[in-house]
Image (tube, grey):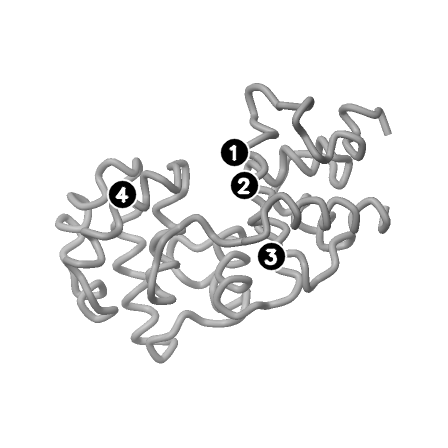
Amino acid sequence: MKEKVNAIIELLKEQYPDALCALQYEKDYELMIAVRLSAQCTDARVNMITPALFAAYPTLEAMAHADVADVERYIHSCGFYRQKAKDIVLACQMLIEKYDRKVPGTMEELLQLPGVGRKTANLLLGDIYGTPGSVVCDTHCIRICGRLGLSQGKEPEKVERQLRAVLPPEESSDFCHRIVLFGRDICTARKPDCVRCPLSHLCKEVTGQ
């Protein structure tokens, strides 16, 4: 398994040298907001919405004091906009009141923020703090790692634990970003392009191993 994982990591690095988060942001708390908006919404749609939102509320304090109904209008097309708007405003308030205006750097603290679950927390830990072992289990990661034979099942927390056990901690965050790119480009949900796939010889769905 170790050899297989290392081979997959190296091939993904060749295919996607820049393991960058697809969400666009400048400030740490803006990434927190963008990730909340991305729930059941595409990153592309979020990136269309956030410039106007961040321009309207250019500071953490401005976002924390925003009228939730006004925020709803900016994020309406993201889906579930009422709950997302409420979570965003409350989370920004908590950053000011409890965390010294900073996105906290531990899983336990992040999970206290409204709207932040383990997937969001892992992404924030990996991208903001470079925390080793940060595994972002989104739908791409769960689907593809299952196909590759790196994990079993579809429950995010269980898959997260399985991947943390096999991925080198220092590679885990970038691995997850590359898996997202790979899932959009080649190993899509509807029709995986196995002919063009650089990982086909390592894929359980193809080789049966």
Q: Is residue 135 above or below residue 60?
A: above
Amino acid of disc 1: Arg
Q: Quote the CA–CA distance across marks 4 and 3.
A: 25 Å
Q: Disc 2 on helix, strand or loop?
A: helix
Residue wearing tag 2: 181
- Callouts 1 and 3 close, C-beta under 8 Å: no
Residue wearing tag 3: 173
Viewer-proximal residue among 187 and 126: 187
Q: Looking at the image, tell me whether mark 4 or mark 1 is earlier in sequence order.
A: 4
Viewer-proximal residue among 56 and 162: 56
The image's mark for residue 19 is none
Q: Quote the CA–CA distance across marks 1 and 3.
A: 17 Å
Amino acid of disc 2: Leu
Residue in view at x 62 percent, y 23 percent? 192
Q: Disc 4 on helix, strand or loop?
A: helix
Amino acid of disc 4: Met
Q: Is residue 48 left or right of residue 134?
A: left
Q: Quote the CA–CA distance across marks 1 and 2.
A: 5 Å
Q: Is residue 194 left or right of residue 21?
A: right
Viewer-proximal residue among 149 and 71: 149
- Callouts 1 and 2 close, C-beta under 8 Å: yes
- Callouts 3 and 2 close, C-beta under 8 Å: no
Residue wearing tag 4: 48
- Callouts 4 and 1 close, C-beta under 8 Å: no
